[in-house]
Image: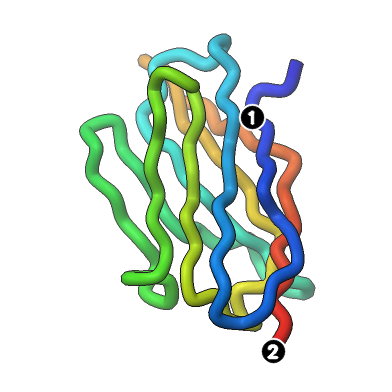
Amino acid sequence: QEDLVESGGGLVQAGESLTLSCAVSKSITNIKRMAWYRQAPGKLRDVVATLSSDGSTDYTDSVKARFTISRDNAKNTVYLQMNSLRPEDTAVYYCNARAGTIRQYNYWGQGTQVTVSS
């Protein structure tokens, strides 16, 4: 069983919306932070949005007011609602969980492709 499983990627036109989902395995406990990262071709993987265990969120400047990270604890799922998509949002999107008590570990999903056409 995968620890994190993303879904919801696809091909959309500029201005449209997509919602990514990340199913979190119940085997991951003491989660301190959930996050979405993205990696465009030829670029490094960068953080897009974070959701801490206290409920606080943070976003990279380029997606503020367009993207929203949220979670459904009953479904053990984290979402990334993406509105007003732009071609520069094209990337593979990865779900990340940072968990642990004394020592923290990073968990990654396999990634889901988001392509925005102009």
Under circle 1, the secondary element is strand
Q: Residue placed farthest to the bottom in the image?
A: 118
The residue drawn where x is 55% and y is 66% is: 17
Q: Is residue 112 above or below residue 88?
A: above
Q: Quadrant of residue 61?
A: bottom left
The residue drawn where x is 68% and y is 32% is: 5
Frontmost residue, 108 versus 17: 17
Q: Which residue is mark 1?
A: 4
Number of other residues with Cα within 10 Å of mark 2, as a class: few under 14, some 14 to 19, many 20 or more: few
Given the image, on which type of amino acid does mark 2 rest?
Ser
The residue drawn where x is 54% and y is 12% is: 26
Q: Which mark, residue 18? A: none
Report the quarter where the C terminus lies: bottom right
Q: Is residue 104 left or right of residue 26?
A: left
Report the quarter where the N terminus lies: top right
The residue drawn where x is 42% and y is 55% is: 49
Coloured how?
rainbow
Q: Is residue 20 left or right of residue 35?
A: right
Q: Which residue is mark 2?
A: 118
| Image x and y of residue 85, in percent | 55, 75
| Image x and y of residue 74, in percent | 41, 18
| Image x and y of residue 48, in percent | 48, 60
Q: Is residue 51 left or right of residue 99?
A: left
Q: Quadrant of residue 23?
A: top right
Under circle 2, the secondary element is loop
Please identify, in this view, whether the residue under mark 1 or under mark 2 is nearer the observer: 2
| Image x and y of residue 25, in percent | 59, 18
The count of marks equals: 2
Q: Is residue 86 above or below residue 83?
A: below
Frontmost residue, 104 versus 71: 71
